[in-house]
Structure formats: C-alpha cells, structure tokens
Image (cartoon, rainbow, N blue to C red):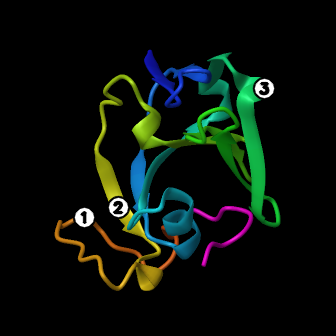
C-alpha cells in the first residue's frame, strides 16, 4: 500500500502500487508545476482510492478531455482521472511513501524548457511514449 497527500493533508489517498513513473517536459506540465518538468504516475483507477478530501480536488480542463486537479485549500496538485477515464494521474511529489519505482523515461522533450538540460540516460521521446496514446496530445 502506498499513501499520498496534498500539502495541507486535506486530500489523502492510497494505491496498491505504482507500475510506472515518467517525466513530462511539455509546456502545460511545466506551467502546471512551475518547474522544468512534471514527474507522475498513471495507475489503473481500480488500484486507487481517496481516503479523504476527494471533494477538495478541483478540476481544471487544460485541453478538451484532459483534466488537471489541485487542492482548493492549499493549491497543491492532486490526483485526477486521466482521459479516457480508466487511469488516475498522480503527481509523484504527492507520495508520502516510497513508490518503489524510479522515473523510466522523459516525454515531450521536443518542447522542454530551453534552460533545462537532461543529464541522465533515461529514454527520451519527442512526444508521448509510442503505444501510449492519451485522448488528447499535449504541446
């Protein structure tokens, strides 16, 4: 069991496991985090449970069918159902416990911040990982 929460702990969640972490360098993730990239997990919705505070998760539709969530109390990012709805997108900084995996790839490096240099040897993809097709592409 892996637990997580937002900054004020108004939102708490648990999940059975994290199969995969990746870093996204698209402009929307950069703006959403205020950072060079976003590191996140996408987990099956059936493996994810809110413990408390689901009603505090405010959704923002950043592009048609793609929602980003934040805590309406503290402003932290929050877990959100990912299009087409069978996955939950979890920003990795929310994990209170070790997820047991490390980032496996960089995505959308074609639009990464020009002031950021990727210095590791992880696979890099200009856009999404081939075979992984969310409902809407990021830019």
Residue of label 3:
55
- Residue 21 location, x and y as percent? 40, 47
Bounds of the magenta span? 132-139
Answer left or right for 58 relative to 122.
right
* Residue 15 on the magenta segment: no
Question: Horizontal placement of 98 versus 64: left or right?
Answer: left
Residue 132, by quadrant, is bottom right
Q: Position of residue 75 (x, y in %)?
A: 60, 42
Q: Residue at x 35, y 22 (%)?
A: 97
Q: Kindly state the secondary structure of the residue where label 3 is placed.
A: helix
Taking the image as drawn, is residue 131 in sight?
A: no
**Residue under the point 47% across and 62% down:** 34
Who comes first in sequence, dot 1 or dot 3? 3
State the image quarter where residue 118 is shown: bottom left
Label 2, on which residue?
105
Residue at label 1? 122
Mark 2 or mark 1, which is nearer the start of the sequence?
2
């Amino acid at each position: 069991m892996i637990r997580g929460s937002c900054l004020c702990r108004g939102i708490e969640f648990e999940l059975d496991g994290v199969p995969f972490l990746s870093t996204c360098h698209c402009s929307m993730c950069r703006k959403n985090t205020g950072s060079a990239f976003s590191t996140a997990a996408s987990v099956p919705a059936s493996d994810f449970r809110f413990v408390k505070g689901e009603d505090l998760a405010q959704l923002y539709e950043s592009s048609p069918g793609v929602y980003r969530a934040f805590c309406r109390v503290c402003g932290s990012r929050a877990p959100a159902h990912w299009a087409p709805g069978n996955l939950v997108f979890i920003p990795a900084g929310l994990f209170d416990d070790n997820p047991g995996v490390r980032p496996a790839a960089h995505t959308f490096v074609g639009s990464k911040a020009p002031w950021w240099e990727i210095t590791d040897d992880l696979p890099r993809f200009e856009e999404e990982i081939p075979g992984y097709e969310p409902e809407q592409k990021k830019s």
